[in-house]
Image (spheres, rainbow, N blue to C red):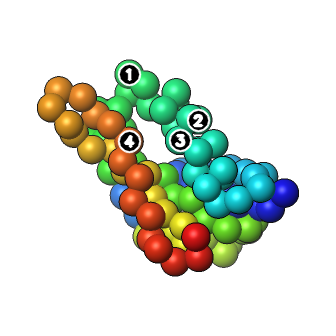
């Protein structure tokens, strides 16, 4: 198992940090997708209006090591409008995957 993390940002403000243990980056992303799908269900529009995004990265970090506007080494989940729905959209960085 390897260590990954999921951070939640609202605009440039860190609002959440969760460690993830997974056997690969793909598994960490899949785990985050399931968790975020349930977390955002019914709340997507308000979360999107607050500029919420979710970053998946390698390792464990202390909160002091997380920078404002941080970009993920693995990728970011964004809330996007698709028709009448708000959906999670994965955008990999292509770095460190």
**Do the residues under discs 2 and 4 have CB atoms within 8 angstroms?**
no
Q: Position of residue 51 (x, y in %)?
A: 33, 50
Which of the labelled discs sits on residue 88, or is there none?
4
Closest to the camera, between mark 1 and mark 4, is 4
> Of marks 1 and 4, which one's residue comes earlier in the chain?
1
Please name whichever residue, 7 or 77, is drawn nearer the observer in this view of the structure.
Answer: 77
Q: Where on the picture, by quarter, is residue 62?
A: bottom right
Which of the labelled discs sits on residue 42, or is there none?
1
Mark 1 and mark 4: Cα distance apart in space: 12 Å
Please name whichever residue, 28 or 6, is drawn nearer the observer in this view of the structure.
Answer: 28
Mark 2 and mark 4: Cα distance apart in space: 11 Å
Label 1 secondary element: loop
Closest to the camera, between mark 1 and mark 3, is 3
Q: Is 75 displayed left or right of 26 in the figure?
A: left
> Of marks 2 and 4, which one's residue comes earlier in the chain?
2
Label 3 secondary element: helix
* Residue sitting at x 15%, y 32%: 83
Mark 2 and mark 1: Cα distance apart in space: 14 Å
**Do the residues under discs 1 and 4 have CB atoms within 8 angstroms?**
no
**Do the residues under discs 3 and 4 have CB atoms within 8 angstroms?**
yes
Q: Position of residue 78 (x, y in %)?
A: 37, 50
- Residue bearing the label numbered 2: 35
**Residue 80 in sight from this viewpoint:** yes
> Of marks 3 and 4, which one's residue comes earlier in the chain?
3
Which of the labelled discs sits on residue 33, or is there none?
3
Answer above or below: position of 45 versus 95.
Answer: above
Using a 10 Å C-alpha cutoff, classify the residue at mark 4 as few (fewer than 14 neighbours), some (14 to 19) or many (20 or more): many
Answer above or below: position of 31 versus 21.
Answer: above
């Amino acid at each position: 198992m390897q260590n990954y993390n999921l951070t939640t940002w609202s605009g440039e403000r860190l609002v959440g940090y969760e460690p993830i243990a997974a056997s690969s980056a793909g598994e960490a992303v899949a785990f985050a997708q399931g968790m975020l799908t349930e977390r955002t269900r019914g709340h997507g529009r308000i979360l999107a209006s607050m500029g919420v995004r979710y970053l998946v990265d390698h390792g464990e970090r202390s909160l002091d090591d997380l920078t404002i506007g941080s970009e993920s080494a693995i990728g970011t989940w964004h809330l996007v409008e698709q028709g009448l729905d708000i959906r999670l959209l994965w955008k990999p960085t292509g770095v460190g995957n």
